[in-house]
Structures are given as structure tokens and as C-alpha cells.
Amino acid sequence: MSIALVRKFVRNRGLERYVARARRIDLNLWGGSEDVAVGFAMSRLRPAASLTYVSLPLRRAPNLGCFKNDGMYSNPRNDSVVIHYVKKPQGMVYLWGVLHDGRQHEPRICRRTAGVS
């Protein structure tokens, strides 16, 4: 999400009730369906936000796998459009260093900073 979209998201009073109800859901029972919940909530921002939906090959929008490189998980790659499953803010700093600054991918640092294995 862009910072502009995040700002619209958190300032939208109409979503407060939805978020309050969502907090009562045990996402472990739903298989971690937070992505679906966020997608639904974002769709409710219209027309206040201009949303564009895109279809990407899985390899261009992977889950971050610091040690994994199979299935839906992969090490950070420069041809990624988005990287999902970063669980800590420091993980974004790590990814910026690898993808933008050209630092070498280091799985142990990736795991510690991004909160994923």
C-alpha cells in the first residue's frame, strides 16, 4: 500500500466499526485471512481513494522467504513488483538495502529483521 492509501485507510471513520469487529476474529482459525480483510476494507474506500487492481505472475509478487526459495516463497529479487509477508518494519529497511542499495541477501539478517523464516 502506498502511504497516501494508508492515510486514507486509517482516517476513514466508516471503517472503524469494521475494524472493531475484525479484532474479535481469531485469524489463526481463518488461515491468516488478514489479506482478504484488508482488501475488503480498501474496497470500501471508494470513491475516496483511487484503487487499481493488477494481476501479476506469482514470481513477481512473492512471499518473502529468507531461507526459502520454493513455492510461494523466495529470496528478495530485483524483478519483484511487491514482496509480501514482511512481519516487521525493519524488514522493509532490509529489503530496501538489498533491492535498492545492492546489498547482498543475508538469510539470518533477513529472518531477524523481517520476522520470517
Image (cartoon, helix red, strand yellow):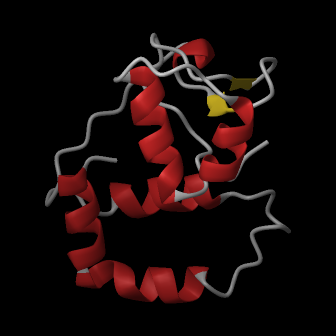
Asked if residue 65 shows in the view, the reply is no
How far across and down, in percent of the image, does residue 104 sit?
A: 55, 19
Q: In this image, 109 relative to 92: left or right?
A: right
The residue at 34%/47% (across/down) is: 1
Name the quadrant containing residue 41.
bottom left
- The C terminus, quarter of image: top right
The residue at 65%/33% (across/down) is: 63
**Residue placed most toward the observer, 84 or 43:** 84
Farthest-out residue, right: 29
Labels in figure, total: 0
Asked if residue 69 shows in the view, the reply is yes
The residue at 29%/81% (across/down) is: 14
The residue at 73%/25% (across/down) is: 72
How far across and down, in percent of the image, does residue 89 sit?
A: 48, 57
**Residue placed most toward the observer, 13 or 111:** 111
Determine whether 78 is above or below 101 in the image.
Answer: above
Q: In this image, 56 relative to 30: left or right?
A: left
Determine whether 51 is above or below 74 in the image.
Answer: below
How far across and down, in percent of the image, does residue 85 sit?
A: 62, 44
Name the quadrant containing residue 13.
bottom left
How far across and down, in percent of the image, does residue 15 sit?
A: 35, 78
